[in-house]
Image (cartoon, rainbow, N blue to C red):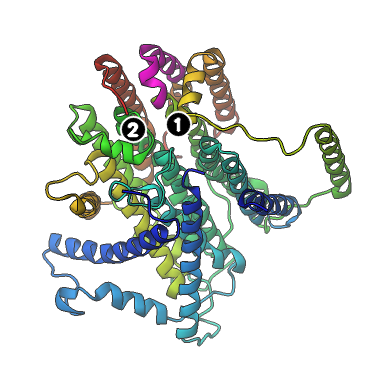
Amino acid sequence: MSADVLAFWFLAIVLVGSALAVVLTKNLFHAVLWLALALTGTAGVFLLLDAEFLAAVQLLLYAGGIVTIVVFAIVVTERLVGERLSQTSRRIGGGAVVAGGVLALLLNAMRGQPFPAARPEMAGDLTRLIGETVLTRFVLPFELLAVLMLAALMGAIYFARPDE
Amino acid sequence: MGGYLSVVIYLVMIVAFAIVSLAVARVLRPRRPFAAKLQTYECGAEPFGQAWVQFPVGFYLVALLFIVFDALAVFLFPWVLALRGLGMWAVVAMVVFLAILGLGWFYAFRERLLEWQ
Amino acid sequence: MEWLTPLVAPFIVLNAIIGIVTYVTLLERKFAARMQSRVGPYRVGPHGLLQPIADAIKLMMKEDVVPTAVDRPVYNLAPIVFLVPCMLIFATIPFAPGLGVADLNIGILFFLAVSAMEIVGLFMAGWGSNNKYALLSAMRAVNQVISYDLPFIFSALVPVLLAGSLRLSDIAAAQAGLWFVFYPVVGQLAFIAFIVSTVAAENRAPFDILEAESELVAGFRVEYSGMKFAIIQLAEYAHVVGASFLGALLFLGAWAGPGPEWLGPGWFLLKAMFVFLLVTWVRWSFVRIRVDQILALSWKVLLPATLVLLIAAAIVVVWRGTPGV
């Protein structure tokens, strides 16, 4: 096995293991930590695919930002005061069936493809290319994204602001 | 893979350093625990309850603002690189983007969310 | 110069960083002492030069008190999880042309992304301790770190924009003619914003509400002792030193200086220490400010100001058509 494949299997085990731990652990805070590990593992997968920009963004936005917002969401939640935070995952059986079904679908779809598809060589600075494409060909979606982010921000502020 | 192998080796070395130094300390240090020493530190007073309590909502709001502007920061990196090739067009595109998000900042300002509460 | 082999370079860098960070504590104590008309550490070795080593040995021999109430796995892992990002940020810094762990394509972005991961360690230490001071301190720390991360990123992007590359060695090379701190107006303003954000993002006084000695005792590390405490301290100082190196690289021309080429790393270290002392100088000069003032400074002033500065720099660059790397 080449180093690439070895790294992939290592990351795959970490990813699946931590993702399962997120939903199965009882302690809500531990679940967030497992989530952080899963998100970091995802960055590793991006890196293996030569997408270094995406990997760094994954760390910056998800492992840094999303984890923060989830932890803060836990500590400001009123309902949980006084009792030890715990998560009760119900209908684990049903969830497992759905997950298994999705896996079967994906495997089925992949069987039709010639599997170890050769990865094309990346030419030039990918980050610069992303910038050039976003600012020319996809400039309208780019600006619309700002509108989307604005809407998300305003909506969140509206609901989360303290009552006067 | 553009030097990431060294980074991974460096990462492993950092973890190894932490584990080895903790292990060495474990051998060297004394261990004389008693009940009062193992209490949670609360400046000498009897500790009460758990530490896991509710926090003011301000923490959450700051994190919310952070996510949005962090996403903006993500777009600034490719923009900086593409700037020279595209010239004024890139500047205008980013200014429009910032202006739209600036409305959100202004709303947060108006709602006094930028002040701690 | 070729990149060193993947095994040797990380080993050298790791040891050098640990050495530098250990001695930076002495530097800070001496500097603070002089500011307060004291002598500082003097007894251990000539002029107290062996003090950091004595401290390290002492911390290693100290009993490790683990309170019964802690969440053990989280509590025990926290120092390691905290140390990793704080040391990993050095991975992409070139200490001289070709001397470093890896000169990544996305250098500065890697630095900032990894640096953001310190938050996870803070959460773990604060939550795992199950101590009111520790938890409150960790939450305050994260709150402040994320607030100042944005101005930090935006001000760091100004030199990146002037150089036209994310690769740190390119940014250093682009300053061969003119250090970016001397770039008219834009450079100085960005440098000031960078220093202020560094002081705040590193949770140092006057922004040290996470500790606020009289209020939260030792902050999020209150329940830590012995080697675990030492590792957390090491990580914190490593983060400050890392930010200092970044500042020296982005604004002060990195390894550029008079003399032969092999003096480069020395110049770089000297400049990084200058940035570090600048941060320390602020730390020991001002009184602590309130949490609302801290957040207002970031969100109301620094965030819009650095963004406007960045756009201004972009217009200047496009206008003058400076060739990038």
Left or right of C90 in this view: A79: right
Task: Determine the residue positioned at 29% across, 53% down.
Answer: C205
Q: Residues within 10 Å of mark 2 (few under 14, many from 20)?
A: many
Dot 1: element: helix
Left or right of C245 in this view: C106: right
| Residue B91 colored in magenta in the image | yes
For the C terminus of chain C, the image quarter is top left
Residue that numbered label 2 is attached to: C160
Q: Tell me the number on the disc at residue B73.
A: 1
Residue C120 visible, this orientation:
yes
Q: Which residues are magenta?
A: B81-100
Name the chain under label 2.
Answer: C
Q: Residue C35: horizontal and vertical position, in percent?
A: 14, 59
Question: Label 2 vs label 1: CA separation?
Answer: 13 Å
Q: Are marks 2 and 1 on the same chain?
A: no
The amino acid type, in three-letter code, at marker 2 is Val
